[in-house]
Image (cartoon, rainbow, N blue to C red):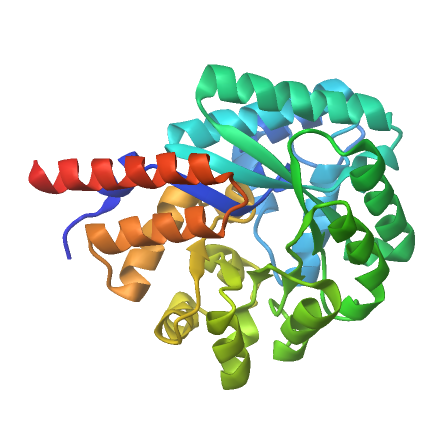
């Protein structure tokens, strides 16, 4: 196969499943750890590579929450958000829906209005200075229970920052059934937010059905186990409920044994709208460009196939119609120019 990495590097892209704190580069994590020396997170960027080696999904959550604990002030929030956008700009990511867990910050004492101002200030700066359009998904940390759900819904509905477009549910799935969160998703959807819960990553397809039937899911975070249920695959394809697939993440958290066993090809063959995403890129030693290269191998794609993947993300996004048209046109122009060259 030809080396598609140069093409991927310049390809205009959208990303729909990427976490705010989980996108902190080793440089930023080390800087935050140095600011807060009581943390067990290493301050040496090289030592972070070992720290970010996970034994299973539960260990990943433990490490992730230790990094969350480094974000303690509005200044930390603003720094993190802008630097994430800077890393996205380097990859030619034009649009991203960044999953933010405000409960993790407000419960640590960050003033909720100062938190909103910090992310919004970073969002405006990212668009004007870096050319990256950011939108927010506020997600419930499932492991924190209904108290976190209530607080997240309140922050989303009552404060509703300008960049907020969707409402999600993250954290572990095992022992955290989706239906209990229905009232909070109902409230968020009534306020005009889209529903994008994680489901079917470390549990079976019933969790995906629950996300659809109880939470009104319009996209599914991961959905890895959906291929175990042909009826579910048909439903996802028919209703254009996109799957936010994160291949390297699934291996790092042991949700999938290895890349050759990843079910993304079955998803595509079933006609499901598949998008490729990086989830928590520095923690997994990856980025969106690398995930596109992985997808090219797993799906046997050429340049046009990769451009099609990029357009899937635009279609499944909550970008306005004019913005979608512009980004699709940019993808097409880039691809045709590349192939003509």
Residue sitting at the far right: 147
Of the pair 117 and 176, the residue shown nearer to us? 117
Q: Residue at x 36, y 43 (%)?
A: 289
Left or right placement of residue 310 versus residue 223 in this view: left
Q: Residue at x 75, y 26 (%)?
A: 116
Asked whether, in this view, residue 118 is left or right of residue 179, the answer is left
State left or right for residue 330 relative to residue 52: left
Vertical relation: 110 (above or below) 20: above
Residue at position x 68%, y 29% in the image: 162
Residue 40 place in picture, x, y as percent: 74, 37
**Residue 41 pos. (x, y %):** 69, 36
- For the N terminus, give its image quadrant: bottom left
Q: Is residue 120 above or below residue 48?
A: above
Q: Is residue 162 visible?
A: yes
| Residue 202 place in picture, x, y as percent | 63, 69
Work out whether 42 lies above or below 223. above
Q: Is residue 312 or residue 23 the one in the foreground? A: 312
* Residue for point 39% across, 28% down: 90
């Amino acid at each position: 196969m030809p080396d598609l990495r140069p093409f991927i590097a310049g390809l205009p892209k959208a990303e729909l499943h990427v976490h705010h704190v989980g996108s902190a580069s080793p440089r930023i994590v080390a800087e935050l750890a140095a600011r807060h020396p009581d943390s067990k997170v290493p301050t040496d960027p090289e030592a972070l590579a070992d720290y970010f080696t996970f034994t299973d999904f539960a260990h990943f959550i433990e490490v992730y929450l230790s990094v969350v604990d480094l974000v303690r002030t509005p200044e930390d929030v603003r720094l993190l958000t802008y630097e994430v956008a800077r890393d996205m700009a380097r990859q030619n990511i034009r649009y991203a829906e960044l999953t933010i867990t405000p409960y993790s910050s407000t419960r640590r004492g960050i003033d909720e209005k100062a938190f909103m101002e910090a992310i919004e200030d970073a969002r405006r700066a990212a668009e004007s200075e870096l050319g990256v359009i950011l939108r927010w998904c506020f997600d419930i940390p499932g492991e924190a229970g209904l108290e976190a759900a209530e607080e997240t819904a309140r922050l989303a509905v009552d404060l509703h920052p300008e960049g907020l477009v969707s409402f999600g549910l993250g954290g572990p799935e095992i022992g955290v059934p989706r239906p209990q969160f229905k009232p909070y998703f109902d409230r968020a959807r009534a306020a005009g937010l889209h529903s994008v819960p994680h489901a079917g990553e470390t549990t079976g397809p019933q969790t995906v059905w629950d996300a659809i039937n109880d939470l009104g899911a319009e996209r599914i975070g991961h959905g890895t186990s959906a291929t175990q249920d042909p009826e579910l695959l048909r439903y996802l394809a028919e209703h254009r409920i996109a799957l936010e697939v994160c291949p390297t993440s699934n291996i790092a958290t042991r949700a999938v044994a290895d890349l050759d066993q990843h079910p993304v090809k079955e998803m595509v063959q079933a006609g499901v709208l598949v998008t490729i995403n990086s989830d928590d890129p520095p923690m997994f030693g990856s980025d969106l460009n690398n995930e596109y290269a992985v997808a090219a191998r797993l799906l046997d794609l050429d340049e046009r196939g990769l451009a099609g993947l990029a357009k899937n993300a635009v279609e499944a996004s909550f970008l306005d119609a004019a913005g979608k048209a512009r980004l699709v046109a940019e993808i097409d122009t880039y691809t045709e120019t590349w192939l003509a060259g």
